[in-house]
Image (cartoon, helix red, strand yellow):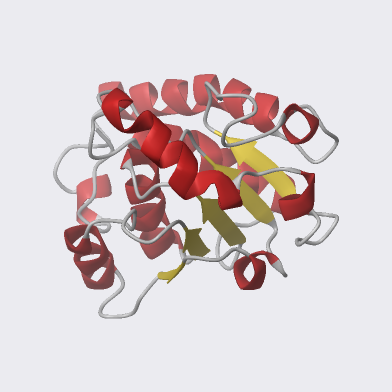
């Protein structure tokens, strides 16, 4: 994890979605939150894997334009992500609802302003009701309970947060295996899209 990207988290997330849906290409993921490091890695994953990603956040908290430009380059000019400030349209057919903390490390001075700006996007029972009842909820943890997500959702029947957390172990083991086997050298993954997880 860096302030800019969190690819190892998204590897585990993609493993979780593949377990749930049986596929990644075309998976409908609604990311509700800040255009932070996790969001950035989600945008790159969507670009490489054909995921239908919708990013919903308040005005002024969008992903950095350079991230969106890189994503367009990865897809050959298309846009792998739809940006919105309101959740309803992005949720209506979502298979996965994903959220993250509103205030990342180093942003503590902005915490109250962020709480105010994001309040209408809390992943709670009302927001969840706008999505299909089969939609699953993900969070990269640790969660700020009662802030970006409520206990009733985090601990509810649609949550797969703890399966997702377990999958970090398997994703990291697989990544280490690739690294030590030499598969990530030139001609390996770098030759299939030019993106090597860091």
Left/right of residue 68 with respect to residue 58 in the rendered view: left
The C terminus lies in which quarter of the figure? Answer: top left
Viewer-proximal residue among 84 and 58: 58
Check the image and report above or below for 15 versus 161: below
Identify which residue is drawn at 65% across, 44% down.
Answer: 123
Residue 87: which quarter of the image?
A: bottom right
Residue 139: which quarter of the image?
A: top right
Check the image and report above or below for 37 versus 42: above
Q: Is residue 181 visible?
A: no
Q: Is residue 186 visible?
A: yes
Viewer-proximal residue among 65 and 149: 149
Identify which residue is drawn at 28% across, 21% down.
Answer: 180
Q: x%, y% of residue 152?
A: 80, 31
Q: x%, y% of residue 111?
A: 38, 30
Q: x%, y% of residue 9?
A: 43, 33
Check the image and report above or below for 157 versus 88: above
Q: Residue furthest bottom?
A: 77
Left/right of residue 95 with respect to residue 129 in the rendered view: left
Left/right of residue 37 with respect to residue 51 in the rendered view: left
Q: Residue furthest left?
A: 186
Total label count?
0
Viewer-proximal residue among 18 and 153: 153
Q: x%, y% of residue 64?
A: 23, 57
């Amino acid at each position: 994890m860096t302030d800019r990207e969190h690819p190892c988290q998204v590897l585990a997330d993609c493993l979780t979605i593949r377990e749930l849906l049986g596929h990644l290409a075309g998976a409908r993921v609604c990311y509700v939150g800040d255009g932070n490091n996790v969001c950035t890695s989600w945008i790159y994953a969507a670009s490489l894997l054909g995921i239908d990603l919708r990013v919903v956040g308040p005005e002024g908290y969008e992903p950095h334009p350079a991230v969106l430009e890189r994503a367009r380059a990865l897809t050959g000019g298309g846009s792998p992500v739809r940006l919105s400030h309101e959740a309803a349209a992005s949720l209506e057919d979502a298979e996965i609802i994903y959220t993250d903390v509103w205030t990342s490390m180093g942003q503590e001075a902005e915490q109250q302003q962020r709480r105010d700006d994001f309040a209408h996007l809390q992943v709670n029972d009302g927001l969840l009701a706008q999505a299909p009842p089969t939609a699953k909820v993900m969070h990269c943890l640790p969660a700020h309970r009662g802030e970006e997500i409520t206990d009733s959702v985090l601990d509810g029947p649609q949550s797969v947060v703890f399966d997702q957390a377990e999958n970090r172990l398997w994703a990291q083991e697989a990544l280490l295996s690739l690294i030590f086997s030499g598969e990530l050298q030139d001609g390996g993954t770098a030759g299939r899209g030019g993106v090597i997880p860091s």
